[in-house]
Amino acid sequence: MPLSRLERFLRLFTDVRPGEGATAVLMFVNVFLLLCAYYFVKPLREAWISVTDLMGFDSGQLRAYSAFAQSLALLPVIAWYGRLSDRMHRSTLITRATLFCMSNLVIFFIWRPGGPFDAITGAALAFYIWVSMFGLFVVAQFWAFAADIYTDERGRRLMPMIAIGATGGAAFGSSVVAPMVKGAEFGADVLLLAALVPLTFSIVLTRVVDTKEGGGAKKEPASEPKTPQDEKPRGGLAMIATSRFLIAAAAITLLLNWVNTNGENLLFRVIAGFLQEEVAEKGLIDPAAVDAFTKNGVAAFYGNFYTWVNAVALVLQALVASRLLKYGGFGVILLMLPVIALFSYAAMALVPVLIVIKMMKVAENSTDYSINNTARNVLWLPTTTEMKFKCKPAIDTIFVRLGDGLAAATVWFGTNVIALSNQGYAAFNVALVLVWLGASIMLIREHRRLAQANAAAGGG
């Protein structure tokens, strides 16, 4: 079968074979829409929390400490999702989970600050926690679906190209926030309703792809032999505890997010200090004026920051990720982020000023959203469907938030016990990155063993 015109175009980005182009494009558009929806609401999350003081905590403390609440909230959610995955077809599971998230967006629009239920406090904190969970969950769910419809060999070729849709959706979503908000009747809060549109189309595309690719009938990889324990359904956390591969994946996820969130908290702390100096220079003393200046300043900074992160990530995903995977292999793309993080936090420790921290965080986050995003999704190709829909969502949500929780503990300890400076936070991250590198080497070995066993058994 010859390549179609579409497939010849797609070969600019990766190795596409005849008959693969249509599904790859549908998956590309699907993840584009999901990330677009997420980046509609993500800047609003930062804006709401930036002017919120609750229970004696300022906005920075609420932002950091909320990770513990997210971890606790995710435990029953992942357990519930795992039970549903045992009973539901994958497209039905994804449809219902996405519809539930959409209903939550409507609830938050009604509960928004300044809305009809403004008297009920806690909306900003609840929204911050929910958006953080939502962004992890819908993306993990999509990549579990992608890993399930592709074999190991096809996934290694096509998933880097599909991931361009993720970085493209993030870049597009963050870039159109300002024009959408300008002149809107409900201000920035209109983004909650706007996010419903791409999520609706995402459901449609998921069902189309599921039907086109056989509706979940793909053969389980023979590399994961069944044991007596497998005769009854197990939860994702229970499965993780029985596998060195899964333990290593969970450890890396935790360390990655501990490091990254420490960096995000450091950036937020430096921005807050910078804006406080601006407030003093402008002589603003009215609390309402100070809040408005701070809220607008934070929203503007993060809008610019996310645009740079996503633009660089898009270039890396389109031009680097697939080639790096093809010629360097899985190990190279998995080690890329911790190596960059090591250099970034060393630079921050030496020169802890806003412009340097911003530049280093752009480098770290853009690599995470592109090359490392490819690594952590290719990681799951040689695993079973059960592992994909139970363990991947558990690791990509609970262990992400546990890492964030440890970052919150770092903030508390650094603030209340040892008065850690900005340089101190960066130096601490350097030490964490060294541990992360060691765990990455372990995961590379386990992944190679699993992929070789799967290939020998004819699974991909």
Image: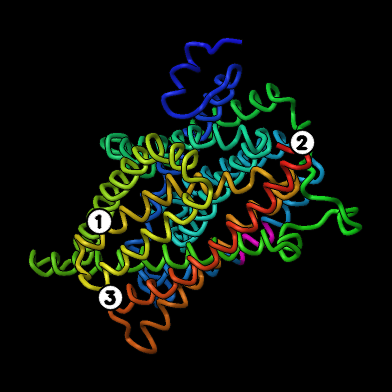
Q: Does residue 419 sit above or below 198 in this rendering?
A: below
Mark 2 near mark 1, Cβ–Cβ under 8 Å?
Answer: no
Instruction: Specify whether 180 is left or right of 88.
Output: left
Q: What kind of secondary structure does the magenta stretch mostly adopt?
A: helix
Image location (x, y in percent) of residue 444: 58, 56
Occupied quadrant, residue 356? bottom left
Q: Earlier in the sequence, mark 3 or mark 2?
A: 2
Residue at the image position 39 percent from the left and 60 percent from the top: 339
Residue at the image position 33 percent from the left and 61 percent from the top: 50
- Mark 1 to mark 3 CA distance (whole Å): 16 Å
Amino acid type indicated by mark 3:
Asn
> Circle 1 is placed at which residue position?
359
> Circle 3 is placed at which residue position?
422
Q: Which of marks 3 and 2 is in front?
A: 3
Which range is magenta?
72-77
> Circle 2 is placed at which residue position?
89
